[in-house]
Image (cartoon, grey):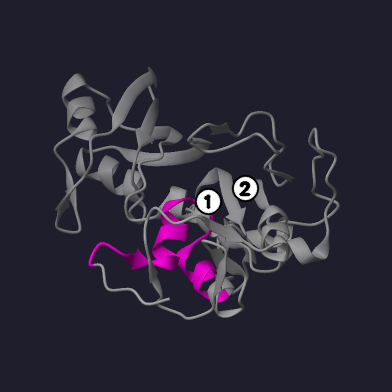
């Protein structure tokens, strides 16, 4: 396929933008000859095609995409999200048959579901709540991609006096790591408790924000990511993202 038109785009980028798979996964599928464009199999990395092209994955690749799993874990305090640290347990070690809470689909734990799982939005060791693992690059991009605008909701326990002035500063005006933070939704629930909703996730962001306005965080729990709420999932247990559920 000879491509001269400046408006033609890399095939992997189109697959990613259409939400078929991540660009990395697209490159792998293209190289394996699993992508058909306007009826022709394309196996050349970097190939450019028209954005209006009819693009399909071959049946085996479609099956592979359907079988990718996403896991929702209620992470306890003291568990690390990703790489294990000395004397600490990594959250992925909690993903076992014994810790599963069955959903409507009835899908049961399979060891292969732990392969190629990636954390999509970490929680620090002192925080608890909703932690997402996924094999799906599209979902990972939705949650932690550069352009992600998915809301993350937290309950935050603090020491210090919560004033309207402090709430206004938390909502907008603070900077971290040399950059202005995006506007946040902040609500006082009790004398020592806040609800904070962010659309970004800098390292220890809420704790650092609170410190900047004279509050000390004593507890932090993530209760929602996009459309998915933690609900009554038992602490230390997990479930699969159900068919029909989505973060956006």
Looking at the picture, tell me which residue is in the foreground, 11 or 234. 11
Q: Residue at x 73, y 65 (%)?
A: 60
**Residue 50 screen position, x and y as percent:** 37, 60
Q: CA distance from mark 1 to mark 2?
A: 23 Å
Give the vertical position of 125 relative to 127 (above or below).
Answer: below
Look at discs 1 and 2 and give the one toward the viewer: 1
Density class for disc 2 (Cα within 10 Å; few <14, some 14-19, many ≥20) is many
Give the vertical position of 132 relative to 61 (above or below).
Answer: above
- Tell me which corner region of the image, top left, top right, bottom left or bottom right, holds residue 12: bottom left
**Residue 71 screen position, x and y as percent:** 66, 50
Give the residue number, with chain letter if any, for mark 1: 139
Q: Residue at x 37, y 32 (%)?
A: 196
Is residue 12 shown left or right of residue 137?
A: left
Q: Which residues are magenta?
A: 6-28
Looking at the picture, tell me which residue is in the foreground, 33 or 79. 33
Give the residue number, with chain letter if any, for mark 2: 76
Density class for disc 1 (Cα within 10 Å; few <14, some 14-19, many ≥20) is many
**Residue 90 screen position, x and y as percent:** 63, 64
């Amino acid at each position: 396929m000879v491509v001269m038109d400046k408006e033609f785009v890399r095939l992997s980028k189109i697959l990613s933008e259409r939400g078929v798979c991540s660009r990395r996964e697209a490159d792998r599928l293209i190289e394996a000859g699993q992508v058909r464009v306007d009826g022709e199999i394309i196996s050349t990395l970097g190939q450019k095609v028209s954005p209006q092209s009819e693009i399909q994955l071959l049946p085996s690749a479609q099956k592979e995409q359907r079988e990718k799993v996403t896991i929702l874990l209620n992470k306890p305090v003291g568990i690390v999200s990703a790489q294990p640290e000395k004397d600490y347990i990594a959250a992925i070690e909690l993903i076992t048959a014994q810790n599963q809470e069955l959903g409507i689909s009835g899908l049961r734990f399979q060891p292969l579901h732990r392969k190629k799982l990636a954390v999509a939005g970490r929680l620090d060791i002192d925080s608890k709540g909703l932690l997402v693992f996924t094999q799906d690059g599209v979902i990972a991009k939705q949650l932690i991609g550069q352009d992600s605008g998915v809301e993350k909701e937290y309950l935050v326990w603090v020491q210090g006096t919560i004033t309207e002035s402090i709430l206004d500063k938390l909502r907008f005006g603070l900077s971290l790591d040399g950059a202005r933070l995006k506007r946040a939704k902040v609500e006082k629930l009790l004398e020592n408790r806040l609800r904070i909703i962010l659309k970004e996730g800098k390292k220890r962001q809420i704790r650092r924000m609170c410190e900047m306005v004279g509050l000390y965080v004593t507890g932090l729990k993530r209760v929602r990511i996009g459309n998915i709420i933690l609900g009554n999932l038992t602490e230390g247990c997990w479930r699969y993202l159900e068919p029909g559920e989505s973060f956006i």
